[in-house]
Image (cartoon, grey):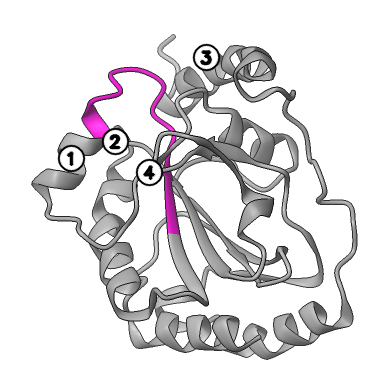
Amino acid sequence: MKLPRLAIFIAPLALAAIAAGVFYGKAPGPGNSEVDCSPASAALAARLAPLAKGEIAALAVAKSPRLAPALSFLGPDGAIHALADYKGRALLLNLWATWCAPCRAEMPALDRLQAKAGDAQFEVMAVNVDTTRLDRPASFLNEIGVKALARYADPSGDSFETLRLAGKALGLPTTLMIDKRGCEIGVVAGPANWDAPDAAAAVAELKGG
């Protein structure tokens, strides 16, 4: 019986996650996601909840925000970056792969959102999780004219596996809204039109929070 592509993808990710302890110096796991966040993050989530509609109706806003899982990935400089290093900046963390058709379809909107709203207070952080043919992500982004997004990558697949083990990712794309305190405010399973007015309103609230 032929397995669905996601099942085929997750199996090697599990092996990659075991090896991630060597590459990143840690094993996968929920990290800090069991630590409750401040009342300020809960208040931000309450303000965001009514904005989860229209083009971002799939946004599941946390009722009790917690610290985002401890993730590590390669930055555009080729060095290893930890998600916790970005505290002080609100993030739209998007995991994507070149083989994922919905990921490819939403990438131009993510690029436009970063071009419009990206600054010292906010970043669209699109992390590629291809584990083979690692030249493909850059080629794809260049072909579609992505200019505003920084090039982040996790060739081990550890970040996806960490979110999967924490119950936050079933497939790709997966997008987390993270506030300036490093707290996970909401998650979207699947693609969204991220440069629509609905998304812009939510991002403005996230930046202000």
Q: Which of marks 2 and 3 is nearer the N terminus?
A: 3
**Mark 3 or 4: the one toward you:** 4
Q: Residue 12 carries which label?
A: 3
- Which numbered mark, 1 or 2, is in the foreground of this view? 1
Residue 114 falls in which quadrant of the image? bottom left
Between marks 4 and 1 in the image, the one whose residue lies nearer the viewer: 4
What is the crowding at mark 2: few (fewer than 14 residues within 10 Å), some, or many (at least 20)?
Answer: some
Label 3 crowd (10 A; few <14 / some 14-19 / many >=20): few
Q: Distance between the residues labelled 4 and 1?
A: 16 Å
Question: Crowdedness of circle 1 by 10 Å Cα count: few (<14), some, many (20+)?
Answer: few
User: Mark number for residue 76?
Assistant: 4
Specify which label sits upstream in the sequence, 1 or 3. 3
- Classify the position of the C terminus by image quarter: bottom right
User: Above or below — where is 187 with respect to 161?
Assistant: below
Q: Kindly indicate whether the residue at mark 4 contacts the one at mark 2 (C-beta within 8 angstroms).
A: no
Q: Which residue is under mark 2?
A: 98
Rounded to the nearest angstrom, the CA distance separating label 2 from label 3 is 16 Å
How far apart are the alpha carbons under marks 1 and 3? 23 Å
- The span picked out in magenta is 125-137
In the displayed structure, 88 sits above or below 152; it is below
Q: Where is residue 126 in the image (x, y as percent from the top left)?
A: 41, 51
Amino acid on which disc 4 is placed = Pro
Q: Quickly name the residue at label 1.
A: 140
CA distance for labels 2 and 4: 18 Å
Give the mark toward the camera: 2 or 4: 4
Alpha carbon of mark 3 to alpha carbon of mark 4: how far? Answer: 25 Å
Label 1 to label 2, Cα distance in Å?
A: 7 Å
Which amino acid type is shown beneath numbered disc 2?
Thr
Q: Are marks 4 and 1 in contact (CB under 8 Å)?
A: no
Residue at the image point whose x is 20% and y is 59% from the top? 147
Query: Of helix, strand and loop, which one carries label 3?
Result: helix
Task: Give the amino acid at mark 1.
Answer: Phe
